[in-house]
């Protein structure tokens, strides 16, 4: 029984050693230029130079019945514009306007 346990331990060490020796290669994962959910999102700065980033964020948040609040801008290639989707402030008469094209 001890021989089987030792062999199992040795096999798991060999496999974990092989996995640890390989690089993570996170650069192969595609990063979308726009990503978001009901709480907010990010827009790639390279996309923001080509389209109206404010309108993209407003349309995204309006899908959830919320308004947009911009949080930060990293104004360089590879940077992002981040925004939050917030509920309509108290005292507002109507829901956000949804743009239909």
Image (cartoon, rainbow, N blue to C red):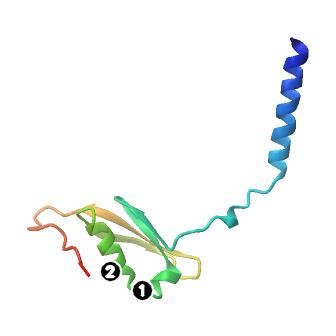
Residue beneath the point at 42% across and 66% down: 41
Viewer-proximal residue among 49 and 28: 28
Viewer-proximal residue among 48 and 89: 48
Distance from label 1 to label 2 (Cα)? 9 Å
Quadrant where the C terminus sits is: bottom left
The label number, if any, that marks residue 51 in the structure image: 1
Residue 17, given in percent of the width and then of the height, sits at 85, 42
Residue beneath the point at 88% across and 13% down: 2
Residue 58, given in percent of the width and then of the height, sits at 30, 74
Residue farthest right in this picture? 3
- 21 above or below 3? below
Residue 8 position by quadrant: top right
The label number, if any, that marks residue 95 in the structure image: none
Residue 48, given in percent of the width and then of the height, sits at 45, 83
Quadrant where the N terminus sits is: top right
Task: Please report contact status of discs 1 and 2: CB closer than 8 Å, yes or no.
Answer: yes
Q: Is residue 83 left or right of residue 91?
A: right
Give the residue number, with chain letter if any, for mark 2. 55
- 56 above or below 84? below
Mark 1 surroundings within 10 Å by alpha-carbon count, few (fewer than 14), some (14 through 19), many (20 or more):
few
Viewer-proximal residue among 91 and 78: 78
């Amino acid at each position: 029984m001890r021989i089987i346990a030792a062999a199992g331990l040795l096999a798991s060490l060999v496999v974990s050693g092989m996995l640890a020796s390989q690089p993570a290669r996170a650069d192969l994962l595609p990063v979308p230029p726009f990503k978001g959910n009901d709480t907010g999102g990010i827009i790639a700065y390279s996309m923001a130079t080509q389209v109206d980033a404010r309108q993209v964020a407003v349309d995204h948040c309006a899908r959830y019945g919320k308004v947009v609040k911009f949080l930060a801008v990293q104004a360089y290639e590879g940077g992002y514009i981040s925004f939050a989707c917030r509920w309509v402030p108290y005292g507002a008469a109507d829901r956000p306007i949804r743009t239909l094209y």
